[in-house]
Image (spheres, grey):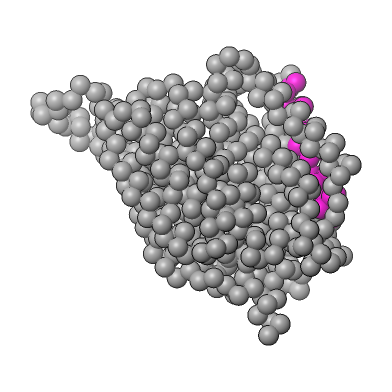
Amino acid sequence: MDIKKIHENPPYGMIAILFIGAFTAFLNNTLLNIALPTIMSEFSVSPSKVQWVTTSYMLVNGVLIPASAFFIQRFTNRKIFLWAMSLFTLGTFIAMIAPSFWVLVLGRMLQAGGSGMMMPLLMNVILIAFPIERRGTAMGVFGLVMFVAPAIGPTLSGWIIEHYTWRTLFAIILPFGIFALLYAAFKLKNITPNRDIHLDVISIILSSIGFGGLLYGFSSVGDHGWSSVNVYSTIIVGTISLVLFILRQMTMNEPMLDFRIYKYRMFALSSVISVTISASMFSGMILTPLYVQTIRGISPFHSGLLMLPGAIVMGIMSPITGRLFDKYGAKVLALIGLSIMTFFTYLLSNLTMEDSYFYLMTIYTVRMFGMSLVMMPIMTNGLNELPMVSNPHGTAMNNTLQQVSGAIGTALLLTLMTTKTKAASFELVKESEMGRLTSDYSIEHLAMLEGVNHSFLISAILAVIALLLALFIKRPIPYEEKNSK
């Protein structure tokens, strides 16, 4: 493989088809959330059971993404994409025609089997196809897939559910999957280097139990609470398995997921900042619809519409941010972006029952603008320090941590919201009994409002921590360049 030749003439056509495949897969991630009540009604299943439509998807992703470093090193990018897109397309078709609830869950798991490989594969191809001075622009375009596709899912889903059936969600995705698969079969070439390495079965078992247990445990907190045996037992088992997995990787010559990449300081720093931002970002995506729909009584469709401008801003800014990163580096962008994100998250911690729809849309949109200046530059800056042979491990680690930190951050902030809501409810009842409560709104809604504001305040503190850490960002010297001197 001639890297210099690839850098001179990057395979734009191949990257475009990878983008289409990845965009389709990630749009699908959030497309089904609003449809869950409809699915629950059609198949006559309980709320706890219908959650398996999303939980099964997340768990398969949690198992596959950490293993992606092995697959990317062992197999060609063409073979991985064809297999991944075939699984995703087959799963989409099965879900669309599902005659029963568990067939739908099977379809979702097959979809996840394909989409779990998409992001690590695409990121790895970009790292190989572009020289370090042009990676920012390429990764900026990648931001369209990473953030915009999941963000527009709820709005699109809300409109479709209002006018058509939930099966239409899969019917829309299916043609894109088929097109990407057929185009790739004829046009996709190989540019990723491969090595004859073997998969360690014990590592894959420990990884699956570890990451799967943590994702399932923390994602179940909102439904079952911390006292549930299912929650704390899976978190404990997941934690123990993850510790054993890490210890095993540190002793292997060819680990499935190489934790030794944390000896590179900028990569380690970028991971910590990304984890902090992810926890804040994903919780915001949960808390905002909760406030808008549950407390203010705004419809799911209009709730999704409120979040759409933020997704559009991120879509516009991602390629621009990539170019700015190539020119100025990550530190300036991170400091500006995190300052904006911190301030507007703080504004969200002061919500009232009278805030206008346009005001809420503006705050959310500007917050997403700040976020668009941060995530990809931070991630790319860390990856730029790694040697090329470690790229698959770096991309796998980033994507895994983003999933886990999103689940943990959301669980913790929802728990803090619930605790604060209960405490506020108790105080409001006392005030009402003493005749000092003059509000026209129900105690339930007022208490939940305090809970949401409290969680947004914690989210703002997380953004402040990320802002302080961003002060230590430096533009790294690439490993190959450092060792050629």
**79 magenta-colored:** yes
Magenta residues, dominant SS class: helix
Specify start and end residues of the magenta stretch as a single range: 76-98
At horizontal 76% and vertical 73% (from top left) the residue drawn is 253
Give the side of residue 336 with respect to residue 259, left or right: left
Estimate the x, y position of residue 318 in percent, counting from the top left.
56, 48
- Comparing 320 with 352, the one in front is 320
Image-quadrant location for residue 238: bottom right
Image-quadrant location for residue 87: top right
Compared with 135, 422 (above or below) is above
At horizontal 84% and vertical 38% (from top left) the residue drawn is 183
Estimate the x, y position of residue 24 in percent, counting from the top left.
69, 36
- Comparing 373 with 435, the one in front is 373
**200 magenta-colored:** no
Estimate the x, y position of residue 126 in percent, counting from the top left.
70, 56
Compared with 134, 154 (above or below) is above
Compared with 203, 96 (above or below) is above
Instruction: Say whether residue 308 is visible.
Output: yes
Quadrant housing the N terminus:
bottom right
Instruction: Say whether residue 422 is visible.
Output: no
At horizontal 32% and vertical 47% (from top left) the residue drawn is 346
- Comparing 462 with 191, the one in front is 191
Estimate the x, y position of residue 235 in percent, counting from the top left.
54, 51
At horizontal 78% and vertical 46% (from top left) the residue drawn is 13
Give the side of residue 267 with respect to residue 111, left or right: left
Give the side of residue 299 with respect to residue 154, left or right: left
Give the total of numbered labels.
0
